[in-house]
Structure formats: structure tokens, C-alpha cells
């Protein structure tokens, strides 16, 4: 008899628990609702594109052995000139163009070419068009152009090469590089 | 090694690999956003040069004929000619440019004109032509780079100075020389 009562009691407890669960579920479902935030974001594809543009000789056109050229990527300008006499002066101007969508800055720039002895005879400068230097940290914003100029001037006569009187020219290689990274 | 520590080692390994991959991705991403722009030039610088020479010989009309006319080749510094002046009035005359095509200025250090001494009826002159007028070659003549002057050289069997004696005398061949010594100014 007692066992029967226990069993009945247990059954009642289980029913009660089930009932409670149902109520909770029902209550939860009555008081729950989905709230949604729908958003649309257009992600613009980034583009990195820095190159030279609009290369022009602004002085000393006749001194050019060949006109200045730019490679297909627009990252290298090449030129070759003769400086025959004192005050011969060659200048070219080019845009540095950030055609991409990412701002850039200068991390490093180097000018290579003249020994200290050659600097007595030749002046070689690369600056912005207004004459200010190109410095580490200079910013070039997306879409921005900055003009730079390259000039080479013959200051003082090179001496005769006494070992070879037919050696009438000294060839000097002039190089400049500027590295841009994302700002 | 028990199962638990083996499992932990595997997790650590995966974590390390994951971190490495992350660094590689960051590195690749960083390298993609940089550009190096270059300007490469070659300048051929002309050295000093010394080059003073004759150019443009022009024989004056009326000169006697000769097969041995003076002529200039490239960078000629010596002119030679040979003429026969057979009778008073015969002359041989030519003009020539003295050109400084070097890059260094030159100045006249000295001149020397020889060959007709003792033969007063052989008139041998060298003049500089300036504004179409014959003048003596200045002792302090300077030729800047790319500058030139014109000389007139004339040898004449003078009609005025010749007489019966000179006409009848056998005159040996005369070696007429004119030397200009230029040095750097």
C-alpha cells in the first residue's frame, strides 16, 4: 500500500515537472521575439597604385641623348644626357601620383651617384617642384599628385684625362629611389 | 605520455601554427602595400679639351696657280703650300681660320714669320682680318672656347721693289714659315 502511494506520488511529481516545463516553454515562447537589425555595408575594394606621371623636360632638351622614358608600371624614369660645357643644365619634372584608394607615406629615399670629388663639378638634385626636399614621413593621400623635379648642372670643367687625351667624357650614373608604404 | 598531455601538446602545436599563419598573412598584407619609385639617369660629362687648329682655307682670286695648295683636314695644325712666282706682280694669297674648338681658352704666346729675309722684293705678310680690315696679329690675342679668327697670308713678287738685278738673279726656293704658339689662357 505504501509503495503504491509512493509510486503515485512520484508520478505526480513528474507530471508536475512536465507541466512546469510546458508552462515555462509556453511563457518563454509568448515573451520571446526575434528582433533583427538588417544592415547593408558596401565594402569598397582597396587599391594601391603609386606611380610617375606627366614626365616633362623643362630645361636642356637639347642635352638629352635620348628623351626620358617611363617603364610600363610607371615606377622607373630613365634618362641620358650630355653635359658638354660649364652651365649646361638639364631639368625634368614629373608627377608622383597616388592613383590608389589608400593614403601613402615616404619611408625611405636615397640619392646615389656622385662622389665627393664629382660634386665639385656636377650639381645633382631631386626635390619637390618648389625646391623643398623629399622627406621620410611625407604623406601622399589617395588621389593626390605631387610634382618633383630632377636637375643636373655642370659647374666646373672636368680636367683633361692626361692618360688618354681622346677620352673626352666622363660618364656618371645618377640614381634616386623613394619608397612609399601605406600611411 | 597520457592522453590528456598528448591532447594538450596537439592544441599547443595548432596554436603555434595558427599564429605563424597569422604573421605570414600580416607580412604579405604589409608587403603588398608598398612601392619603390626610381629615377635612373646617365650623364656624360665633357672633359676639358685643347684644340686650336686651322680651318677653311680659301685661295684669293688672282693668285698664281699651283698644284700644292694648302688644305685642311680634321684638326689641321700645319699648312703647307708650294708656289712659283715667276715674274714681278705674281702673288699667292689665301685666307684661313684659326679655330679654338676646345673647351679651354687659348692665348697667343708667340709668333714667328721667317723665310723671306734678305729678299726685300718678296713681300711676305700675315695679317688678321678684323671687320674686313687687315690688321697686325695682336701679341696679346686670346681665343675663347669656340672662337675663331681669320688670317690672310700673302706672298708677292713685288713689282715695285723688283729691278733688273732681282729679275735676272736666280732666287732659290724660299721656305716661308709662320708659326703661332698658343697656350692656355
Image (cartoon, rainbow, N blue to C red):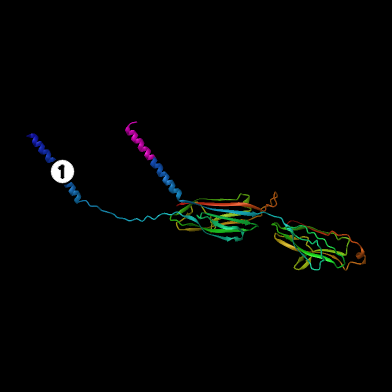
**Viewer-proximal residue, A134 or B19?**
B19
Tell me if B89 is positioned left or right of B101 in this view. right
Q: Name which quarter of the figure residue B174 lies in.
A: bottom right
* Residue A147 in magenta stretch: no
Q: Quadrant of the N terminus of chain A?
A: top left
Q: Position of residue B41 (x, y in %)?
A: 58, 54
**Viewer-proximal residue, A44 or A114?**
A44
* Residue bearing the label numbered 1: A18
Which chain is mark 1 on?
A
Q: Which residues are magenta?
A: B1-16
Q: Position of residue A66 (x, y in %)?
A: 59, 57
Which residue is painted at 48% across and 58% down in the image? Answer: A145
* Residue B15 in magenta stretch: yes
Which residue is painted at 42% across and 46% down in the image? Answer: B26
Q: Residue furthest left?
A: A1
Give the class, few, some or many, for how many residues have Cα within 10 Å of label 1's Cα (few <14, many ≥20).
Answer: few
Tell me if B181 is positioned left or right of A11 in this view. right
Tell me if B14 is positioned left or right of A70 in this view. left
Q: Position of residue B51 (x, y in %)?
A: 72, 56
Which residue is painted at 41% across and 42% down in the image? Answer: B20
Which residue is painted at 34% across and 36% down in the image? Answer: B8
Q: Name which quarter of the figure residue B6 lies in.
A: top left
Tell me if B35 is positioned left or right of A89 in this view. left
Q: Is residue B16 above or below residue B129?
A: above
Amino acid at each position: 500500500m505504501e509503495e503504491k502511494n509512493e509510486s503515485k506520488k512520484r508520478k505526480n511529481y513528474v507530471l508536475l515537472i512536465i507541466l512546469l516545463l510546458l508552462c515555462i516553454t509556453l511563457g518563454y515562447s509568448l515573451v520571446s521575439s526575434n528582433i533583427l537589425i538588417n544592415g547593408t555595408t558596401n565594402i569598397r575594394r582597396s587599391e594601391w597604385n603609386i606611380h610617375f606621371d606627366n614626365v616633362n623636360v623643362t630645361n636642356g632638351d637639347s642635352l638629352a641623348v635620348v628623351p626620358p622614358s617611363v617603364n610600363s608600371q610607371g615606377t622607373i624614369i630613365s634618362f641620358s644626357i650630355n653635359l658638354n660645357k660649364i652651365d649646361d643644365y638639364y631639368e625634368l619634372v614629373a608627377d608622383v601620383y597616388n592613383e590608389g584608394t589608400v593614403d601613402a607615406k615616404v619611408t625611405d629615399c636615397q640619392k646615389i651617384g656622385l662622389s665627393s670629388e664629382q660634386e665639385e663639378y656636377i650639381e645633382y638634385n631631386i626635390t619637390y617642384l618648389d625646391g623643398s626636399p623629399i622627406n621620410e614621413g611625407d604623406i601622399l593621400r589617395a588621389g593626390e599628385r605631387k610634382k618633383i623635379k630632377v636637375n643636373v648642372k655642370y659647374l666646373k670643367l672636368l680636367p683633361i684625362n692626361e692618360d688618354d687625351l681622346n677620352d673626352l667624357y666622363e660618364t656618371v650614373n645618377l640614381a634616386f629611389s623613394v619608397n612609399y608604404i601605406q600611411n | 605520455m597520457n592522453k590528456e598531455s598528448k591532447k594538450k601538446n596537439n592544441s599547443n602545436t595548432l596554436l603555434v601554427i595558427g599564429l605563424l599563419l597569422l604573421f605570414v598573412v600580416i607580412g604579405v598584407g604589409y608587403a603588398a602595400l608598398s612601392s619603390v619609385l626610381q629615377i635612373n639617369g646617365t650623364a656624360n660629362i665633357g672633359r676639358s679639351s685643347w684644340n686650336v687648329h686651322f680651318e677653311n682655307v680659301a685661295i684669293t682670286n688672282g693668285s698664281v696657280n699651283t698644284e700644292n695648295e694648302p688644305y685642311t683636314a680634321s684638326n689641321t695644325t700645319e699648312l703647307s703650300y708650294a708656289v712659283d712666282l715667276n715674274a714681278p706682280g705674281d702673288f699667292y694669297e689665301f685666307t684661313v681660320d684659326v679655330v679654338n674648338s676646345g673647351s679651354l681658352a687659348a692665348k697667343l704666346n708667340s709668333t714667328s714669320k721667317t723665310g723671306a729675309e734678305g729678299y726685300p722684293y718678296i713681300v711676305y705678310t700675315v695679317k688678321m682680318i678684323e671687320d674686313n680690315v687687315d690688321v697686325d696679329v695682336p701679341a696679346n690675342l686670346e681665343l675663347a672656347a669656340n672662337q675663331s679668327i681669320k688670317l690672310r697670308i700673302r706672298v708677292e713678287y713685288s713689282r715695285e721693289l723688283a729691278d733688273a738685278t732681282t729679275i735676272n738673279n736666280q732666287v732659290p726656293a724660299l721656305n716661308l714659315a709662320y708659326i703661332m704658339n698658343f697656350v692656355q689662357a
